[in-house]
Image (cartoon, rainbow, N blue to C red):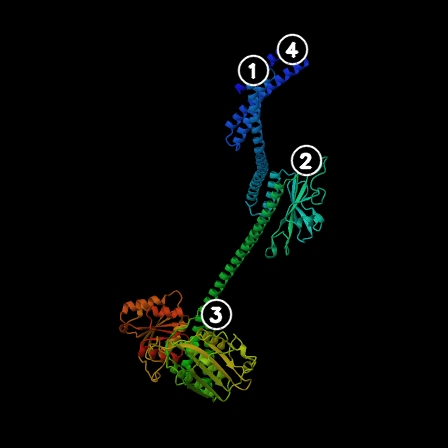
Amino acid sequence: MGSLLRMNRLLSSIVESCNCIIDPQLPADDLLMKYQYISDFFIALAYFSIPVELIYFVKKSAVFPYRWVLVQFGAFIVLCGATHLINLWTFNMHTRNVAIVMTTAKALTALVSCVTALMLVHIIPDLLSVKTRELFLKKKAAQLDREMGIIRTQEETGRHVRMLTHEIRSTLDRHTILKTTLVELGRTLALEECALWMPTRTGLELQLSYTLRHQNPVGLTVPIQLPVINQVFGTNHVVKISPNSPVAKLRPAGKYMPGEVVAVRVPLLHLSNFQINDWPELSTKRYALMVLMLPSDSARQWHVHELELVEVVADQVAVALSHAAILEESMRARDLLMEQNVALDLARREAEMAVRARNDFLAVMNHEMRTPMHAIIALSSLLQETDLTPEQRLMVETILKSSNLLATLINDVLDLSRLEDGSLQLDIGTFNLHALFREVLSLIKPIASVKKLFVTLSLSSDLPEYVIGDEKRLMQILLNIVGNAVKFSKEGSVSISAFVAKSDSLRDPRAPEFFVVPSENHFYLRVQIKDTGIGITPQDIPNLFSKFTQSQALATTNSGGTGLGLAICKRFVNLMEGHIWIESEGLGKGSTAIFIIKLGIPGRANESKLPFVTKLPANHMQMSFQGLKVLVMDENGVSRMVTKGLLTHLGCDVTTVGSRDECLRVVTHEHKVVFMDVSMQGINCYEVAVVIHERFGKRHGRPLIVALTGNTDRVTKENCMRVGMDGVILKPVSVDKMRSVLSELLEHGVVLES
């Protein structure tokens, strides 16, 4: 730049000298020559300055692709300048050498100019393409600038959306969600008003539910079929609406033009499975309407990113509302479930209290009823063995039959109660099945002989002699069914047949729930009791196994039954994994009772180690108990007196006590048997048994201990066995029963009943 300044100063001095040389008084031709001379000088000077600038440009530019073209162009300019400079010497007389130099310079100038012109033909398209790319790059740069602006706008929108979403979802209370949405939108978009219209319960109107500025009272309604509402509900995008539409008239009229108004739909959850307290029960898809208004005192318009922000927020509000609806419903369901659980727990406690109260009542009544029954049966049996007139004997026998019926009723009620609450369990053991059937036959025959009925028993040859099962319950089932057959037959016969059930006879279409499980360790016993009695109508058969139910034909016979026997038999059979039913062709044609039960097969035939013995030898009736010393402990004076009377009648030497201490003080080695009532109030009779065991040591040196009880539960029996008692006798006790008990004690050293 310093050289350029020096050149400008040189040119200025030359111009001044030229002005001095030119004399305006010269002739016109000479003056013209003078001007050409000066012009050639300045042209040459300009030509020589341009290459200097080109050299400076090439030196400073590291990316220009056509340096050799600039060299050619510079040479052309230099030659042009040289031509004009040499031409200065042609204005005066000049030598031949000047002409030769002048000609050479012009020839070189012509050559270089032609070459340069030809090269420019090829260079210009490249230069044009470079210019095109430059324009393309400029457009791309502008587009990138716009996209960067959009990205920055989207980032700003995303930041606002995240902020709004965080605020909206910070709670799951729908009222807070909606109010927070309006407040945050109003703050982010600088709105003048923002409102939310919710569908009414009928679904025919929109109700103004929430506003930002509270300029209008909440509760205004508009018809949902308005064109502007249908237009908004018809798309999921934001729609610009008129400021004068019914849903947009939310601000007072002013002197400024109202700002732009947009509306967007907010989808509501499909509530077919949910019921929100004050929301409509929606069966089709419904929407709420959100209206947003820009300030009236500005020329501001809605931008694209703002509309996108509103759409995203509307979707987020819909999601948050769905979550809130689900939460409200789940909380309501949880509260309802808690209430139901509390009610169920209360009902369970009440049921448990009722069961305990019933069990306590039954236990007390069992003991309290069996105690007087014990006295009635015992004294009646004693009276029966005295010398009586026929009329007196008939009365005593009637008393005994009635007492036995009442005792059976007590047993049935207690068994049914324990069957219903699930506390009754089978007493499984090995027993002689053939002997059980024969014993049932021996018990039934005396009753049948009075009515002149012929009773037969048929046992198949393949029926095992020893089986595993509940002997007492099986006998109870047989006695009940056979007893009914004898009771309701006036003449004819009663047949009992038992055999191993074959697989084809186990399936009964009347009981599809009866499922047979074959095994090598058990078999199914099929028993049929057929009678020639009064028969049963087909419509009465399904009701026979219901509690306290009898058929009309049975009721008219005045049988005196309670309707509990068959109901209990059915439950016993079910406990034994079996099935029971009755067949009859009608009234007067007799009936057949059939039941199938599951019994086990013992490993060896001689494994019949019975826990108690109930079979009486033939000489029991002739066994003498004269002088047998017996101790009776019972707090009830009447019961104590009755038991003493039974034992005294059998020839025993009886001592009675009414307390634990008295019993332990009186008992000696001379006492062979101790009968104690284990239901005594305030006395732990089990401790008495333990003390007697400890005092007398080995079994042959101590008295045999037998419990007298009115409780039929399994726990009582187990407690008696646990403390080492030798037997359990259930009240009431007759003379024959006491005789058999003493016989078993003296012969086997153990007796157990339940």
Label 4 or label 1, whichever lies nearer to me, is: 4
The CA span between labels 2 and 4 is: 73 Å
Q: Amino acid at mark 1?
A: Leu
Of the numbered discs 1 and 3, the one sitting upstream in the chain is 1
| Mark 2 secondary-structure assignment | loop
Of the numbered discs 4 and 1, the one sitting upstream in the chain is 1
The relative height of residue 86 versus residue 458 in the rendered view (above or below) is above
| Mark 1 secondary-structure assignment | helix
Residue 282, labelled with which disc?
none
The answer to whether one can see residue 628 in this image is no
The CA span between labels 4 and 1 is: 22 Å
**Mark 2 neighbour density, 10 Å: few (under 14) some (14–19) many (20 or more):** few
Of the numbered discs 2 and 4, the one sitting upstream in the chain is 4
Residue that badge 2 annotates: 299
Is residue 642 or residue 182 the one in the foreground?
Answer: 182
Proximity of marks 1 and 3: CB atoms separated by less than 8 Å: no
Residue that badge 4 annotates: 23
Q: Amino acid at mark 4?
A: Asp
On the image, the x and y values in percent for residue 45 come to 57, 20
On the image, the x and y values in percent for residue 60 come to 51, 27
Of the numbered discs 2 and 1, the one sitting upstream in the chain is 1
Q: Amino acid at mark 3?
A: Glu
The CA span between labels 1 and 3 is: 135 Å
**Mark 4 neighbour density, 10 Å: few (under 14) some (14–19) many (20 or more):** few
Label 1 or label 3, whichever lies nearer to me, is: 1
Position of the C terminus by quadrant: bottom left
| Mark 3 secondary-structure assignment | helix
Within the image, what quadrant is residue 191 found in? Answer: top right
Residue that badge 3 annotates: 420
Proximity of marks 4 and 1: CB atoms separated by less than 8 Å: no
